Amino acid sequence: MTRDASMMDRVLELPGQLEWGTTVDEPEVPHDRPILMLGMGGSAMGAAVGALAAANAPRPIEIRRTYGLPEWAVASEALVVGVSYSGNTEEVLSGVARALDAGLPVAAIASGGVLAEQASSHGFPLVAVPGGLQPRAAVGYQAAAAVRILGGAGALSDGDGQLAEAADVLNSALGGGDGGAFVLGRDLGQALAGRITIVYGGIGPGALAAYRWKTQINENAKAAAWWHEIPELNHNELQGWETLQALSNESVGVLFLRDGGDHPQVKRRLDLTEEAIGGKVLVAGSVDSTGTGPLARFFSLAAVGDIASVTMAEALGVDPTPVATIEAFKVKLTEG
């Protein structure tokens, strides 16, 4: 199977998606409130990456991946940000409806759909992202839009700088298809194809990138994958490699994501974890982050996984773009 011209090219467009964000004005939203961002799937990932860029925000930022709103958001009059690439995600619309009913300030990120219509009719700010992509392939647009809204809310002051650095890091790493990160992603994808992949990262950019690896393998390669974060996994999952070693060695591949911003003890735990499971399961390798800011470091790890997941799809003979099982599930959900 030849390389998918659509999904692989979308990965190579990530630097441009982040650069797009530097051209977007920060919307006028309240500065003095906690922030709740609503999203599912690739849209929730964009929200989470934006929140990662604002890790030092002076007020709480939380991501909600379900229906409605938590009571604390209503009680504290939080700023509610609905993030839905299509604009039609039912869980997000449920939370936005609750926020409007409660009189909370709302902002949105969407390419169109019901959410964009609500922004127009109710007069709340909308950052309109370019449409026509799978939500997971628009993560750069959605993360950049989240950065702009969080900047408007006073949650971060260096949004332009973080977006520009992340774009520069990716341009260098991907090299238009022959950079070091691209080559590494291809190699890791070939090594992991046909195996259940488990990705480990330290809490922060590494763990969020590990989750992105897992979801990209699920959707692009149509394959099972899992992730976990250090230090938590050292208190439970580490013990789980003790039995079924023959099966693990044959069927599972573990990958480590190492971030330059990891706490020193997290770095040591990553090393010791790799040592502890060596010989019990295939350790496919590791990826080291590059860049200074959290946005650049996250994307330097995640982009390698995007490349690997499409490479795995090629090796498995599947088209990485459609997600027929998910779409069929949505249809059945509406029939209920």
Image: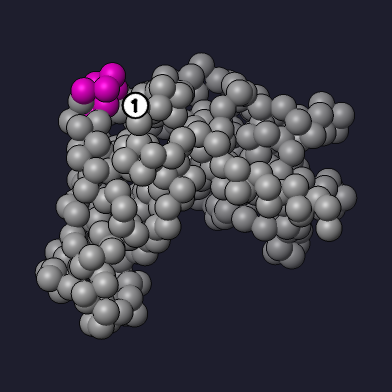
Q: Position of residue 289 (x, y in %)?
A: 24, 43
Tell me if mark 1 has few (under 14), some (14-19) or many (20+) residues whose alpha carbon lies within 10 angstroms of its own: few
Q: Position of residue 327 (x, y in %)?
A: 66, 44
Q: Position of residue 13 (x, y in %)?
A: 41, 22
Tell me how many marks there are: 1
Badge 1 amino acid:
Thr
Q: Quadrant of the N terminus?
A: top left
Q: Residue at x 42, y 52 (%)?
A: 223
Q: Residue at x 16, y 65 (%)?
A: 274
Above or below for 101 versus 239 = above
Q: Nearer the viewer, residue 303 or 71?
A: 303
Helix, strand or loop at mark 1? loop
Q: Is residue 48 left or right of residue 175?
A: right
Instruction: Please check the rendered image and state whether residue 177 is part of the magenta-colored stretch, yes or no.
Output: yes
- Residue corresponding to mark 1: 2
Q: Residue at x 25, y 38 (%)?
A: 185
Task: Choose top left, top right, bottom left or bottom right for residue 237.
Answer: bottom left
Can see residue 121?
Answer: yes
Q: Is residue 238 left or right of residue 64?
A: left
Q: Quadrant of the C terminus?
A: bottom right
Q: Specify start and end residues of the magenta stretch as a single range.
A: 171-178
